[in-house]
Image: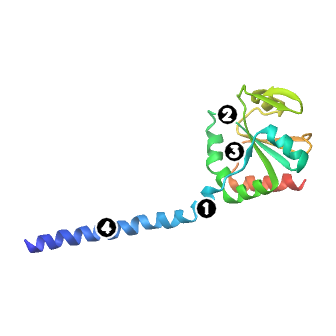
Amino acid sequence: MKRSKLFSIASVFLLLAFSGFVFAPEKLQNQGQSESEDKKINWLTIEEVEKLTKEKPRKIFVDVYTDWCGWCKRMDATTFADAAVIDYVNENYYAVKLNAESGDNISLKGINTTGAELARSFRVSSYPTIVFIDETFHNVTPVPGYRKAKEFHDILKQFNEE
């Protein structure tokens, strides 16, 4: 009887010790992510960006998306969650999210429009599309398709240097 109790206690102890090893790497791996999870791209409205560019000119990128777009959601979860992308965007760009199917009113350069109309004026026909705009709101460059973080970071740098 003593032997079976001892065996049961030893088994429970080994099971607990083993589970610590199994789950510890995940905890260790996620420790460094809490800082980057707190970081986010500073998304603004197009109206806010229009005002800010008058005071402090910066290039703009607009993430044109739809609610049903799976690749848009993936880009949100991966590319726009990448620490290097977040840092670069927040330091060098004004970032805007634009729902390409939105009927909400938007005022830009004194013209009232909707998200859907603005997306069309940016020549967006697929999702996701990132639209790069210069500081004066004149040069508009749409870049369609999902981009991984490294590729997107390179595109951000390239457009910023032009």
Q: Is residue 88 above or below residue 94?
A: below
Question: Could you tell me how far apart the alpha carbons at marks 3 and 1 are, in whole angstroms?
Answer: 25 Å
Crowding around mark 2 (Cα neighbors within 10 Å: few <14, some 14 to 19, many 20+) is some
**SS label for mark 1:** helix
**SS label for mark 3:** loop
The type of residue carrying mark 4 is: Leu
Q: Which residue is mark 4?
A: 16
Q: Nearer the viewer, mark 1 or mark 4?
A: 1
Q: Residue at x 89, y 30 (%)?
A: 110
Question: Between disc 4 and disc 2, whose residue precedes?
Answer: 4
Question: Between disc 1 and disc 2, whose residue precedes?
Answer: 1
**Residue 134 visible in the picture:** no
Front-most of 135 and 156?
135
Q: x, y percentage for residue 8?
A: 18, 68
Numbered mark located on residue 66 in the image: 2
Q: x, y percentage for residue 113?
A: 81, 26
Numbered mark located on residue 146 in the image: 3
Q: Are marks 1 and 2 in contact (CB under 8 Å)?
A: no
Question: Between disc 2 and disc 3, whose residue precedes?
Answer: 2
Q: Residue at x 60, y 56 (%)?
A: 37
Q: x, y percentage for residue 49?
A: 82, 43
